Image (cartoon, rainbow, N blue to C red):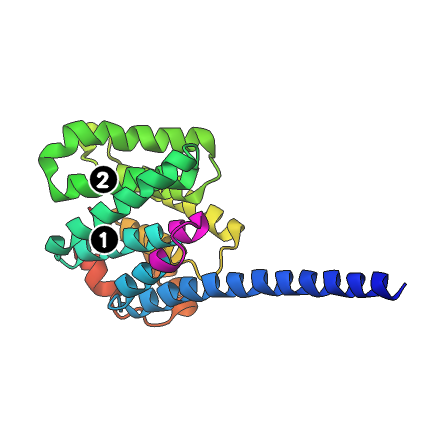
Amino acid sequence: MERSKNNYLNLLLLGLLFCLALSVSGQKLETYQCHFFNAYLEGDMSNWMRWIEEIEHKHSEEQEWGILALQARYGLIGYYFGTDQKERIKEVLQEGENRLERYLEQEPDNARLLSLQAAFDAFKIGLARYKAPFLGPKVVGSIQQAMEVDPDEPMVWLEEGNALYNRPALFGGDKKKAIAAYRKALELFEESEESCNYLTVLVEIFILKGYSETKQDALYQRTRQKLHRQYGGLPWLDDFLSSEAGY
C-alpha cells in the first residue's frame, strides 16, 4: 500500500514537472515574441539579429521556434529595404532560405512556411528586378498553394496583399485589392490571438499606407488615430509612409 502511494506521488510529481516545463517553454517563446513586438513599436531593430541567432542556436530542431525566427528575418529584411540598407539583406535572406527549405522538407503543406517562401522569393525580386519574370510566377504559385492548403492562414493574405501592392498594374497589381487582402490578414491574425505578434501591427501599417496612396483620406485618418491609441507614438511612422518601404 505504501509503495503504491509512493508510486502515485512520484507520477504526480513528474506530471507537475512536465506541466511546469511546458509552461516555462511557452513563456520563453512568448518572451521573444514580445521582444520583437516591443522593439518594432519603438522602431529599434538593433537587437533583432541577436535574438534571431539565439533562437536558431538554442531551438534549431523546434519548428515553432524556427517559424518565429523566420518571421523575424522577414521583418528585418523589410526594414532593410525600407531604410535603404540593401547591402545587409543578402546574408539574412540566404540563411533564412536555407532554414525554410529544411522546414518545408519536413512539412511541405504548411501554409505559413509556403507564405514565407513566397515572401523570400519576392525579396529576391526586390534585390534584382530582372529576376521578376522567373521568380514572379514562383511567388504567385507559393501563395496559391498556401491558399489551397489553408485559406485561414493570415500570412497567406499578407503575401497576397504584398503581391497585389507591389506588382505593376499592367501585370495585375491593384492597391485597393491589396488593402482588402491586408484587411483579411488582419482579421485572421486577430482571430488567432497570437500574443505579441508584430505582424499584426505590420499589416495595419500596410493598410494605412494603402489608404494614403489611394487617397482614402477619411479611412486614413481614422486608422492612424486607432494605431496611435493602440500602440503609442510609433516614431518611425511618417518616415515609413513617405518612403518606398517594402520590396
Q: Amino acid at mark 2?
A: Ala
Task: Kindly report the secondary structure that dominates the magenta region of the rendered protein.
Answer: helix
Cβ atoms at labels 2 and 1 below 8 Å apart: no
Please identify the quarter of the rendering in which residue 130 is found.
top left
Counting from the top left corner in percent of width and height, residue 207 is at: 33, 51
Q: Position of residue 9 (x, y in %)?
A: 77, 65
Q: Is residue 86 visible?
A: yes
Residue 110 part of the magenta-drawn span: no
Left or right relative to 44: residue 105: right
Looking at the rendered structure, the kind of residue marked 1 is: Ile
Residue 223 picture location, percent across and down: 37, 58
183 on left or right of 240: right
* Residue under the point 34% across and 44% down: 179
Q: Position of residue 41 (x, y in %)?
A: 34, 67
Dividing the picture into quarters, in which one does residue 144 lie? top left
Residue with the mark numbered 2: 122
Magenta part of the chain: 56-67
Residue drawn at x 52%, y 62% as measured from the top left:
25
Where, by quadrant of the figure, is residue 142 drawn? Answer: top left
